[in-house]
Image (cartoon, helix red, strand yellow):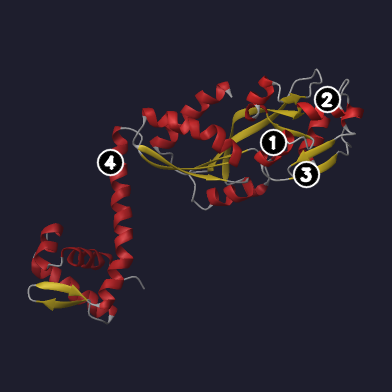
Amino acid sequence: MIPDLNRLKTFYYVCLRRSVSAAAGELYVTQSAVSQSLKNLERELKHPLFNRAGRRLVPTREGERLFGLMAPFVRDLENALADGERESSGPCGLLRVGAPAEFGAKYLVGICARFRRDYPAVSFAMTLGHPSRLLPELAGGNLDIAFADIFSSAKEYSREYAVFSIRLVAREKLVLACSREYRRENLPGKADARSLLKCAFLDYNTHGAAVRGWFGHHYRMAGAKPEIALAAESVQAVISGIKSGMGLGVVPEYLIARELASGALAKIKTGKPDLINRISLLRLKGAAVSPAEKAFTESFLKASKDF
């Protein structure tokens, strides 16, 4: 059973100040009230919490252990209350954000940097990973918001995601690309579906879901069977394979824009609009929205117009 919280509070300040009189002044009570509260707490816990050294109180081993348990809680509580007071004058505090690795590292960090120029009192703790890792963290209250690229329409939301509010916030162009040398050697002419399927591909799993999705979008081929030369869950690994001339891969265009512009990499064009990957912002339904989260979301939505 948890001891009386008022007695624990009294103990904390006595241990912190090493003095009954100093703790009494901190708590705006009499010294006798502090002494009585300590006696009742020691009786409740069934062991002494202090030894006397002259006029000073020295915690016993049990007292030190109890103080060690309470100190982080009190500091966190004081910081949270201070943040709440500061929020009345503008966004502040820690914002915990989850995002896909490459999207977070290459794009989201820049938005955070620009945001802090306007709101320097806000800091970020960013968790990068796959939605299978981020969403349980969000559901467990360890993240304030998370970006994920797993949903394309509200009809596809499964029951396990019913605890989240989901908002489409950005779109990224997905392109099929290869190195200039690979294109010259394997696709010297027109890159139609038949010639493309004779090539090697890089994907994020052995099933080639991204590549098959690209063929479905551009050629309406539901049963494409590409040869997957490399399967890796990392976009950067796929891009590295593309640059090495290992084959073709589907990647966000903005991640290879410089190489496409220089001609080091070649984009496969079909005459149809690019495949679009939809990125959603998720948060726990019913959770209070802090000023920092509200301001950052607005900042992201403004920045994502150019994405």
Closest to the observer: 152 or 108?
A: 108
Mark 4 lies on residue? 85
Is the C terminus in the top left, top right, bottom left or bottom right quadrant? top right
| x and y percentages locating residue 9 in the rendered image | 24, 63
Q: CA distance from mark 4 to mark 2?
A: 63 Å
Instruction: Specify which label sits upstream in the sequence, 4 or 1.
Output: 4
**The disc label shown at residue 239, or none:** 1
Residue farthest to the right, as pictured:
194
Single out the mark in the foreground, 3 or 4.
3
Residue farthest to the bottom, as pictured:
46
Is the N terminus in the top left, top right, bottom left or bottom right quadrant? bottom left
| x and y percentages locating residue 76 in the rendered image | 33, 54
Mark 2 lies on residue? 184
Disc 4, SS: helix
Instruction: Specify which label sits upstream in the sequence, 1 or 2.
Output: 2
Q: Residues within 10 Å of mark 3 (few under 14, many from 20)?
A: some
Give the side of residue 145 with respect to residue 217, left or right.
left
Q: CA distance from mark 1 to mark 2?
A: 18 Å
Give amino acid for label 3. Leu
Single out the mark in the foreground, 4 or 1.
1
Residue depicted at 82% across the width and 42% down the height: 228
CB atoms of marks 4 and 2 within 8 Å: no
